[in-house]
Image (cartoon, helix red, strand yellow):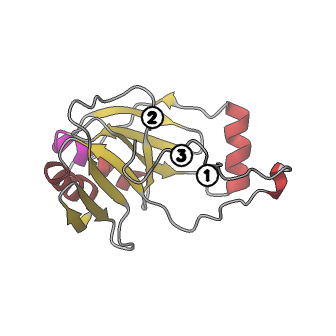
Amino acid sequence: MDPDERILDPHEEPTPIPADPRDAPKPRVRRTHLSLFVRDPEASAPWYEDVLGMEVTARGPQWVFLSFGKKHHDIALIRAEDGAVTGGVGLQHYGLEVEGDLDEWRRLYGMLLAKGVPVVKTTDHKIGFGLYFTDPDGNRFEFFHETVTDDEEGKRILGLHGAPSDPVEIEPLRG
């Protein structure tokens, strides 16, 4: 259980659900962050600084916050319980849409290989290209290069092709 969560007392009522789901509040997300369990936040943080170009913005005994430079934190690394295992049910990957052209994306591919980062796959999503890789704790990330920038067209293409993730051979650029 997350440290901020709690179990309701036996006589405590949960938050009521509106009778009509259309009356339920809907989030209007302005910014996001990702919180990951890792074996050792202090040991993992340098990987995020080196590979993702992040900066540490805050730290505590059980956590490290990192930023891409525009927010106070974009990724939080939280110490996992002893014996925690990787995989199974949970986060499949965290997509990071990168700026620049396809050659810049290929340079990032070359950088990952040069740093010995495990690359899982490269895919053609028909709306862009995905480059999947893992951090030292096995958390999967994607560098995403968007090729279809109109969201309505992107939705149409994803629906038409069934949210494709077709393997694609892309030559990394090194140096």
Relative to 23, 42 lies left or right = left
* Label 2, label 3: how far apart the Cα atoms are: 27 Å
Mark 2 against mark 3, which lies toward the viewer? 3
Report the residue at 48% width, 43% height from top.
129
Determine which residue is flagged by label 1.
148
Residue 6 appears in the rendering: yes
- Rendered location of residue 99, percent (x, y): 43, 61
Earlier-in-chain disc, 2 versus 3: 3
- Rendered location of residue 37, percent (x, y): 31, 44
Magenta highlight: main SS: helix
Mark 1 against mark 3, which lies toward the viewer? 3
Report the residue at 53% width, 46% height from top.
9
Earlier-in-chain disc, 1 versus 3: 3
Residue 96 in magenta stretch: no
Q: Residue furthest left?
A: 43
In this rendering, the answer to whether 21 lies above or below 86 is: below
Residue 109 appears in the rendering: no
Q: Which residues are magenta?
A: 110-116
Residue 90: mark: 2
Asked whether 154 or 59 is in front, the reply is: 59
Q: Secondary structure at mark 2?
A: loop
**Residue type highlighted by circle 3:** Asp
Report the residue at 34% width, 47% height from top.
36
Task: Check disc 1: other Cα within 10 Å, few if <14, some if 14-19, many if 20+.
Answer: some
